[in-house]
Amino acid sequence: MTEITTLTIPVEDLVPSPTNPRKKFDQDTLQELANSMKAAGQLQAILVREIKPGKGRPPKSQKYEVVAGERRYRAASLAKLDTLRAEVRELTDSEVLHVQIIENLQRDDVHPMDEATAYSILIKDQTAAEIGKTIGKTESYVHKRMRLASLSKDMKKRYLSDKIRYIHAIQFARLTDDNQAKAWKALHQYEYHNFTDNKLTVSEAELRSTIGREIFHKISAGKFDPKDAKLTKAGACASCPLNTACSPLLFDDVKEAQCTDPKCYKDKEKTTFTNSIKKLEQKHPDAIHGGNEYGHIKAGGKAYPEHKTGAKSPGKKWQPVIITKASWSDNLGTLAWVDTEAKQAKSDSNASNKAAEEKAERVRKIDRDYEAKVFTDMLAKGFEVEPPVEIKTAYVDNLEHNIGGAFAFALLLHFDMIKTGAPFDSAETFDALGWEAQEEYTGPLFEKMVQQPIGWLFNVMEAAEDCGSYSRMDKNKAIRLQLNASGGDWDKDLKAFRSTRSAELNKEKKAAEKKAVEDSKAELAEKKKQMDEAKKKKTVKALVS
C-alpha cells in the first residue's frame, strides 16, 4: 500500500495538475468556498504528490502537484490563506490520472463534457463496461457521455455556455460536424418556435424529428443495394460506422437502421441509377431515353398512352424506352416498351386546356386583387395584418414535406407578400422578405401554389387530413375576422368586387384586343407601304438602266 504522509504546505508551493479533467469552475461557488475556508478553516485535506527535482532544478525549489482538491486550492488562493493541509502520496502519472478522473466523476456537479474527457482517457486501458462498473453506471451511459467529445467546436461552446442542454447535445454528438451545422441551420429556419433568448428550447422528440428529417435516411428505403461495397468509398452499409445499426448503444432509440450521411446515401442512389442506365443501354442498344408521366410515356417528342414493362419485347412494333425521368422515383432506371402504332396521348397544352387555365387564372387574379384591397384598407385603418397563430402552428407541426406543412408555408409567405406588395419570384422573394428558402418549397409547383388566392389555400388546408389544428379553421378566417371587425362583410363584399372587377377585366380585355387588331392593321399597312416603295425603286432603277 502506498505510504501516506499528512503535511501542512505553503499555498505558494502548490501547483495545479495539468491533467485534471475538470476545466470549468464556477466563480460564485468558488468565492463562497473561499469565504467558508477563511471563516471556519480547511475541513478536508487535499491530495498531492511531490514534484521530484528535475534537471537544473535545485532541491530547495521542490513543490507539490495538486492531484485532488483543486477547487479547495483555488479557494485558498482567493481567501489569501498561507497554508493548506495535504495528504502526500507517491503516485505514477497513470495513477494520478485515474484518481483525478474518479474523483471528478463522483462530484454531484460534474459537467457531462468533463465526463466525456475522462471516459475518453480511461477507455484506453478499460472497456466501457468496466468503466461503468467502477463508477456505478451502465455501459450505454458511458458510450453516450464519451460521444459528447464528438461535438463540433461550435456545438461544444453552445453546450458549455448553456445555449443547449444535454438532451440536445447528445443528439448533435451522434452526427458529423457538417451534419451538426446542417441540423442547427434547420432549427434556425423556425427560430421563433425553437429558441428563447438564443437558447434552444425544443424537446428531445422535436430535435430528433428535425434531425430525422434533415439528416437520417432509412437504409431499407434506399434505391440501392446496401450490401454493395463498390457504390461509394464508404463500402457496404452493414459495416459503416455512420449506420445507426452499427452503434446500438449510442442509437438505442432508433428502431430501424438509418444512414447518417445524406451525401453518401444520395451518391449510392445516383451511382445505382447510372449503372442501371448503362446496363440497359448495353442490353438494348436501340433504346431511347424517356419519362414516365402519370400514365403515359414521353420519349422522342411524343407521348405514348400504351406501354408495357419487362425485359423482353412484346412485339415488333414496340420500342424500348429507358426511364430517366419519372413522376415517381421508383420508375427511374427501369425499362418500358411503347406501342409506336398506337394513338398518341393528347398534349396537355391543347386549346381547351389552355382556355380553361386562362379562365381559372382570371378567377384567381380577381380573388387576389380583392384580398390585396382588403389588406390595404385594413392597414390604412390601423389594423394589424398578421396570420393567425394556427397557421404558424400548422407550419411547425407539419414540416415533413407533407401537404399540410407546404400549404402552411405558402400561407405564411403569402401574408408577407401582400403586406409588402412583393410579387412572387422564387428565391428573390425569399431574400426580399428575409425568408430562408428551402429546396422543396422553391419549385414550379410551389410557385404556382403561392400565387393562388388565400381563400383557395384555406380550402385545401381544410381538406388535408394531416394538417393538425389548422384543418379546423374556417375558410378565410384570418382576413375574414379582420374585415368583419372593421365593419365589412367578407362574402357580400367579395361577391360585389368579383362582379365589378370582372366587368373591368372584360373591358380591359376588349380594349387590349381592339388595340392588338389596330396594331396589326397598322403593321400590315406599314409593311405594304415599304413593299410599294421598294417596288417603285426597283421600277425606276430598271428604267434608268
Image (cartoon, grey):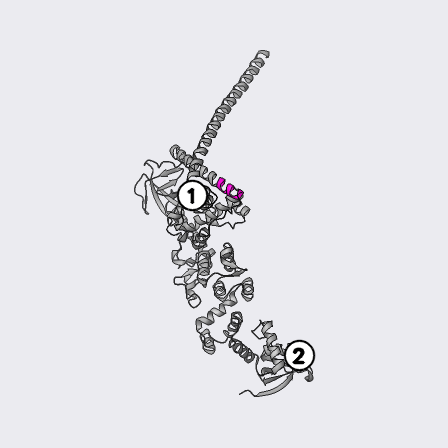
Q: Earlier in the sequence, mark 2 or mark 1?
A: 2
Q: Which residue is mark 2?
A: 80
Q: Name the residue at the left extreme.
A: 314
* The residue stretch that appears in magenta: 372-383
Location of residue 245 in the rendering, given as x and y in whole percent from the top left corner:
41, 64
Q: Main secondary structure of the magenta part?
A: helix
Q: Position of residue 272 (x, y in %)?
A: 41, 53
Q: Which residue is mark 1?
A: 455
- The answer, for residue 101, to whether it is visible in the render is yes
Q: In the rendered view, tell whether residue 117 sits above or below residue 334.
A: below
Q: Camera-side residue: 29 or 250?
A: 29
The location of residue 243, given as percent across then percent down, is: 43, 62
In the visual, does 161 lie left or right of 406? right
Give SS at disc 2. loop
Q: Label 1 amino acid?
A: Gly
The crowd level at tag 1 (other Cα within 10 Å; few <14, some 14-19, many 20+) is many
> Is residue 70 in view from this perspective?
no
- Check disc 2: other Cα within 10 Å, few if <14, some if 14-19, many if 20+: few
| Marker disc for residue 205 | none
The amino acid at mark 2 is Lys
